[in-house]
Image (cartoon, helix red, strand yellow):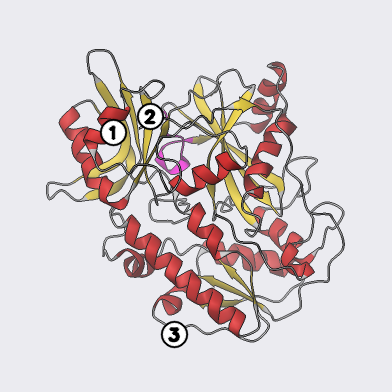
C-alpha cells in the first residue's frame, strides 16, 4: 500500500466559488418538514431558529417512522434530513445492536441509513416536494475513504492516506496496519472506522524504532470481546491489545491516514470545527487537548478563537485563506446546504489541512457567527434558516434549492456525544 500524494498546503489556496447573493422568495409557510428525532436538541434548535425568523414550526417526521415504513410526506414540502443520533431505539434499528455505546455495526448503520435516505428522497419527490440535501453526497460524507478522495480530487489539502478512494486496498486487520506503519511517512497514523464519527473507534497509533507501539483510543473492550465507546481516553502499548482492537474493528471497514502534527495553543494541540452554510464559512470553534484526539466529549476543551487568529497572523499566515479552504471542502458537496469541516492547523500556524467533512456538523449550541462574517450574531441553525429563506441576500447566498435548481449528485456521519451520528 502506498500513500496518496495529498499533503497539507499553505492556507493561501484558491478560494471556493460561492453562489451569487441574489434575492430569493421566502420559504412558503407550512411546507417545511424535518426528518429527525422528536424532542432532540437538533430539532428544537432548528425550530427555535424558524420561530425567530417569524416562520411556523416544521413538521417533524420521526426517524423511527422512516425506518419502520410508517413515514409519509406531503405535497410541496421542503424536507430537511437531520441526524438520527442520540436515540437508542433508532440506533438499534440502524445498527442492529441494543446497546448504543457499542462501536460495532458501522457498515450496517451505513447501509441502513443510505437505504432510508433513498426511500425518503423517492417519496418526497413523488409527492412533488423538495429534498434539502443530496443522498449521493451523504453516501460519500459517511464513508471516510470516499470523502477523503473527493476532497483530494477537489484540490483540498488532506492528510496522505493509503485507503483513500473506492479502489484502494482494504484494511483487513492488524497485519495490514502493521505493514503500513513501516511505510515512509506513516510511522504515526490515525486508524478510523470508515463510517464512524465523534472519534468512535478511532486509534491514534505511533510506532518507534525497535518495534515499540503506542495507541490512544476511547475504545473499551469488554471480557466478552465487545467494543464500547468510552468517555475516557486510554493508552495501550501492548501490540497484542492494539492488534485485537484493530482486528475487531476491521470488518466494518477502516480508513488510515497520516497523523499530521498539529499547532499548539497554550501548550495543547489544537484544531477547529468550521461550519459552512450555503458555501460560506460562518462559525468556528477551537478544540484543544493534551493528546492527539481533541473531541470535546473526550476531554477536549474549547479554545480561544481570537488567540488562534492572532497566532496565524503572527506566523505570517492568512486566516481568511484558511476559511476559504473550508469553503472549498464544502464546495465538493454542492447539494449539501451545511457541513462541519474539521480544519487541522500544522505546526507553525501557516498551513492547514482538512481532516473530515461532517454532514451533521452544525450542533454547536450557543456559538454565534464569526465576527464580520455573513452570520455574525446568528447561531448555526438561524444562519441556515437565513440562507434557506434568502433573509440575508447581501451576506448569505440563498440556498440553490430556493432558486428551483435540484442539488447535484457527487461521486458519506458526526457525533457530538458517544451516541450521536453526524
Q: Report helix, strand or loop for mark 2.
A: strand
Q: Bin the neighbour count of mark 3 within 10 Å (Cα to Cα): few under 14, some 14-19, many 20 and up.
A: few
Outermost residue, front direction? 167
- Classified by dominant secondary structure, the portion drawn in magenta counts as loop
Residue 183 seen from this side: yes
Closest to the observer: 201 or 235?
A: 201
Closest to the observer: 31 or 58?
A: 31
- Percent position of residue 397, x then y: 79, 56
Residue 10 forms part of the magenta stretch: no
Q: Which residue is mark 2?
A: 189
Label 3 vs label 1, nearer the camera: 1
- Percent position of residue 257, x then y: 42, 34
Screen quadrant of the N terminus = top left
Residue 103 seen from this side: no
Real-space Cα separation, disc 3 to disc 1, in angstroms: 43 Å
In which image quadrant can residue 299 be found?
A: top left
In which image quadrant can residue 8 be found?
A: top right
Real-space Cα separation, disc 3 to disc 2, in angstroms: 44 Å
- Percent position of residue 152, x then y: 56, 39
Q: In the image, is residue 109 above or below residue 54?
A: above
Q: Which residue is mark 1?
A: 177
Q: Which residue is mark 3?
A: 70
Outermost residue, left direction? 223
The stretch in magenta equals 292-300
Label 1 vs label 2, nearer the camera: 1
Q: Is residue 410 left or right of residue 188?
A: right
- Percent position of residue 326, x then y: 65, 41
Closest to the observer: 48 or 398?
A: 398
Taking the spot 74% from the left edge, 33% from the top edge, the residue there is: 320
Tag 1 and tag 2, C-beta contact below 8 Å: yes
Q: Bin the neighbour count of mark 1 within 10 Å (Cα to Cα): few under 14, some 14-19, many 20 and up.
A: many
Amino acid at each position: 500500500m502506498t500513500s496518496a500524494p495529498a499533503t497539507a498546503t499553505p492556507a493561501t489556496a484558491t478560494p471556493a466559488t460561492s453562489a451569487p447573493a441574489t434575492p430569493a422568495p421566502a420559504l412558503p409557510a407550512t411546507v417545511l418538514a424535518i426528518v429527525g428525532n422528536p424532542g432532540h436538541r437538533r430539532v428544537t434548535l432548528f425550530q427555535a431558529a424558524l420561530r425567530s425568523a417569524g416562520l411556523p414550526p416544521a413538521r417533524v417526521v420521526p426517524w423511527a417512522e422512516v425506518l419502520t415504513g410508517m413515514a409519509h410526506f406531503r405535497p410541496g414540502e421542503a424536507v430537511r434530513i437531520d441526524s438520527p443520533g442520540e436515540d437508542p431505539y433508532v440506533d438499534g434499528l440502524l445498527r442492529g445492536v441494543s446497546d448504543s455505546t457499542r462501536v460495532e455495526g458501522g457498515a450496517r448503520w451505513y447501509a441502513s441509513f443510505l437505504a432510508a435516505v433513498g426511500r425518503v428522497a423517492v417519496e418526497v419527490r413523488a409527492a412533488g416536494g423538495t429534498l434539502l440535501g443530496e443522498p449521493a453526497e451523504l453516501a460519500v460524507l459517511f464513508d471516510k475513504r470516499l470523502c477523503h478522495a473527493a476532497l483530494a480530487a477537489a484540490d483540498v489539502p488532506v492528510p496522505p492516506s493509503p485507503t483513500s478512494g473506492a479502489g484502494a486496498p482494504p484494511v483487513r486487520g492488524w497485519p495490514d496496519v502493521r505493514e503500513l506503519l513501516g511505510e515512509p511517512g506513516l510511522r504515526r497514523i490515525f486508524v478510523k472506522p470508515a463510517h464512524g464519527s465523534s472519534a468512535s473507534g478511532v486509534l491514534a497509533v505511533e510506532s518507534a524504532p525497535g518495534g515499540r507501539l503506542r495507541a490512544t483510543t476511547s475504545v473499551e473492550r469488554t471480557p466478552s470481546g465487545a467494543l464500547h465507546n468510552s468517555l475516557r481516553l486510554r493508552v495501550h502499548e501492548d501490540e497484542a491489545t492494539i492488534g485485537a482492537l484493530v482486528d475487531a474493528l476491521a470488518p466494518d471497514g477502516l480508513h488510515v491516514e497520516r497523523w499530521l502534527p498539529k499547532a499548539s495553543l497554550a501548550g495543547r494541540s489544537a484544531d477547529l470545527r468550521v461550519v459552512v452554510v450555503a458555501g460560506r464559512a460562518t462559525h468556528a470553534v477551537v478544540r484543544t487537548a493534551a493528546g492527539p484526539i481533541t473531541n470535546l466529549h473526550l476531554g477536549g476543551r474549547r479554545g480561544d478563537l481570537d488567540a488562534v487568529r492572532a497566532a496565524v497572523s503572527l506566523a505570517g499566515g492568512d486566516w481568511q485563506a484558511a476559511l476559504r479552504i473550508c469553503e472549498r471542502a464544502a464546495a465538493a458537496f454542492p447539494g449539501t446546504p451545511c457541513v462541519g469541516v474539521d480544519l487541522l492547523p500544522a505546526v507553525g500556524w501557516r498551513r492547514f489541512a482538512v481532516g473530515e467533512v461532517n454532514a451533521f456538523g452544525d450542533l454547536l449550541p450557543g456559538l454565534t457567527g464569526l465576527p464580520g462574517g455573513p452570520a455574525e450574531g446568528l447561531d448555526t441553525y438561524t444562519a441556515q434558516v437565513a440562507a434557506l429563506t434568502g433573509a440575508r441576500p447581501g451576506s448569505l447566498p440563498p440556498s440553490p434549492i430556493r432558486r428551483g435548481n435540484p442539488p447535484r449528485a457527487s461521486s458519506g456521519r458526526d457525533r457530538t456525544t458517544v451516541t450521536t451520528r453526524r
